[in-house]
Amino acid sequence: IKLEKSNQGSKNVALHFVVEEQPLLAEVSFKGYEKFDLDKLQKTADIQTGKKLSEQELLTAANKIEKLYADKGYLTAGAEYKLEEIGKNKVKAVFTITEGRKVVIEKIRFHGNNAFSQGKLRGVFKETTQNSWWRKIFGAPKLDKDKFATDKNLLVDFYRENGYRDAKVLSDSISYTPDNKGLFLDITIEEGPKYHIGTITWTGNSKEFATTEILEKTFRIKTGDLYNAKLIQERLNFSQDNSDVSSIYLDRGYLSFRTNLDEVVVNPDTVNLLISIREGEQYQLNLINITGNTKTKDHVIRRELYTIPGEMFSRKNVIRSIRELNMLNYFDAGKLAPEIQPNEENNTVDLTYSVTEKQSDTFNASVGYGGSSGFTGTLGVTFNNFSLQDIFDTDAYRPLPHGDGQKLSFQWQFGSDNYRTLALSFTEPWAFGGPTTVGFSAFKTHRTYDYTGIDSSIENKTIDQYGTVLTVGRRLTWPDDYFSVGLKLKYLHNKGGFVSFINETGSNVPDEADEYSITGTISRNSIDSPIYPRRGSKNTLTAQLAGGPLPGTIDFYKFTGSSTWYFPLSRKLVLNMSAQAGYLSTFNKNDYIPYTEYFYMGGSGMSSLPTIPMRGYDDRSFGELLETDSDLYGGTIYTKFTTELRYPLTLSPSVSIYGLAFFDAGNLWKDSESVDFSDLKKSAGVGLRLYLPIIGMIGLDYGYGMDSVPGDTEKGWGFMFSFGTSTD
């Protein structure tokens, strides 16, 4: 718009407004961009074509683009625009972007911090870090403003967890190094006073199960304790182990229960807590809906649920139901929490479990070389959600009938001319309408041992075995419902399968014999995940008896025990500690033992023999030499201890990966007279676990064996591969 003036006589003027119509914005283009795609830039600029646009709107769009780059660490990026005529009263807006490069954070400096050191506060930040020599190797740290904002919140939370209730970040600023390649991040903090808890007052609690004494015992925060905002909220409402105040009410159906917390500062260093409770009404479970199960049948899911229509709502039972569904390993663990739909008119609540199926069947194949077996291989498939009742339904084959939660497994192991074994097993986990497990398996093995490594005058030994196993188990309700018991009946026919320690062959060893054995097991499993447990434990005791009062010509007894515990050290980091031991003996000194019943230790544990893994050492290298070949060592007594630190890299339905650092200690002895618990062999190292639904767990470990053992006299590093092993 232009204003022109002209005189109209001596006392008058004429004003003329000359108006130039704004052009129509017909097109927008971008140049010089690589870090973001065109669609992202267009959405950020948010400019609509086909209408008239002011210069101010274009300037705002350029500023938005610069902010997009700055938020991702490109602090020197710039965006300029110009208009190009492309027709009568039509223009094209061209944005030219100068991206530059990400600026390295050279130093993070805190100001106003008296309670904690610079290093301590830098350690609170999860995503924003300063440069260092080792970070230069893996990539120097860059500033991401979104992540920096999150880290500032973590900083305030850290102070509030350590008594500084009023702490806040006053300001932050950025300055550049002289060459503009690095920046200094300055953060000014106001810590405020350090508070302790004064009086704690409860109001509104009228139920006998929620007296003030019970609430105080559950809250576990008392007068004089250091103020901790996070702990206060966890003890009131958000404890992951269901030990907070809200659980007292929510586990008894009080779904509308609420707490209101007032904090009153009464002294410069004291804050009183006033906690008022609204108890609400009890809610009864009405409908329990299940959606999303495209493979698994409804009854398989419902039998695992602790939320039963007609009973009172219980948060504890909801959490336990989620745990049981997760332990099936059929569904995406991150999507098991039910939708809770209360009906205030009749005080009922509906629950909807929306599950997402994942691949539950596993296929394994491997090949290797070792010892007398030469080249060996394994082929196997396990259907973990099989359906026997649909075996004659041709429409159910995908590739086999599934959905009833049964387990069907085929395994074939083979070696170069001298080793092969075939096994078939079936398990029904819910027989006779309850949590009773019934299983059956059959197997056949052929193996030849070459004695040329020991004594060329001894003929080769051929071992043939076949047998069946029947298992029965039951989940218990006492001492709690994490306990279960099991019973296994085994028949094994041995032909040539009896070995002793070298030069100690018993005089009464027959060519053929039959084993009838019974094994009892009691176990307790409370872990929260089958793939990456964060808390809970697995404890098992077994006792096996062969012969004696049972039929057959093989007599021995065996005891084993194991205990594994998981402790969350942080949101992701987990400490895993385990111990195990075993004892094998015969009733008479000259009784013989099948070679499959000895204990073996060393290596990855990938063997048809019952091998205890021991990273950093060769396969089956512990114990005493057996009269089979030159590289098979075994024993009758063992113990092993393991400590691991685990950290997840990704936990998703398609793949789960976690890294670990381990320390193992253990040994295997020939007999009770050889036992020396001060002579535990040790190893340490790092490892990686990869879980693929179609394959199972794959383990890679690199460990250092610190001691020499009979079958591995050289100490040193060793790489181990394991396949299909458990989380233990």
Image: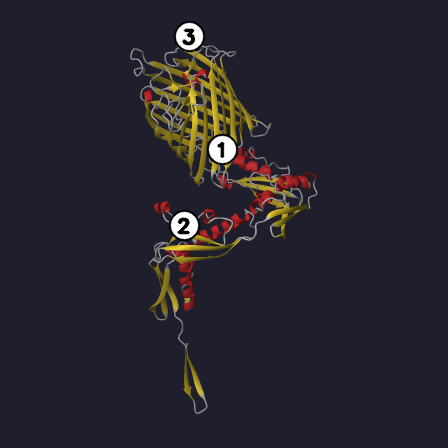
Work out whether mark 1 precedes mark 3 in sequence or the reverse, and give the earlier one. Answer: 1
The residues tagged by marks 1 and 3 sit, at their Cα atoms, a distance apart of 51 Å
| Labels 1 and 3 touching (C-beta < 8 A) | no
Residue type, label 3: Asn
The residues tagged by marks 2 and 1 sit, at their Cα atoms, a distance apart of 52 Å
Work out whether mark 3 precedes mark 2 in sequence or the reverse, and give the earlier one. Answer: 2
Q: Residue 650, position in %: x, y?
A: 43, 41
Which sits in the foreground, 407 or 478?
A: 478
Work out whether mark 2 precedes mark 1 in sequence or the reverse, and give the earlier one. Answer: 2
Q: Is residue 86 visible?
A: yes
Residue type, label 2: Gln
Q: Residue 495, position in %: x, y?
A: 39, 13
- Residue 508 has which mark? 3
The residues tagged by marks 3 and 2 sit, at their Cα atoms, a distance apart of 73 Å
Q: Please, which colouring scheme is shown? A: secondary structure
Q: Residue 169, position in %: x, y?
A: 50, 55
Q: Secondary structure at mark 2?
A: loop
Which sits in the foreground, 725 or 294?
A: 725
Instruction: Identify the residue position indicated by label 1 in the image.
Output: 403
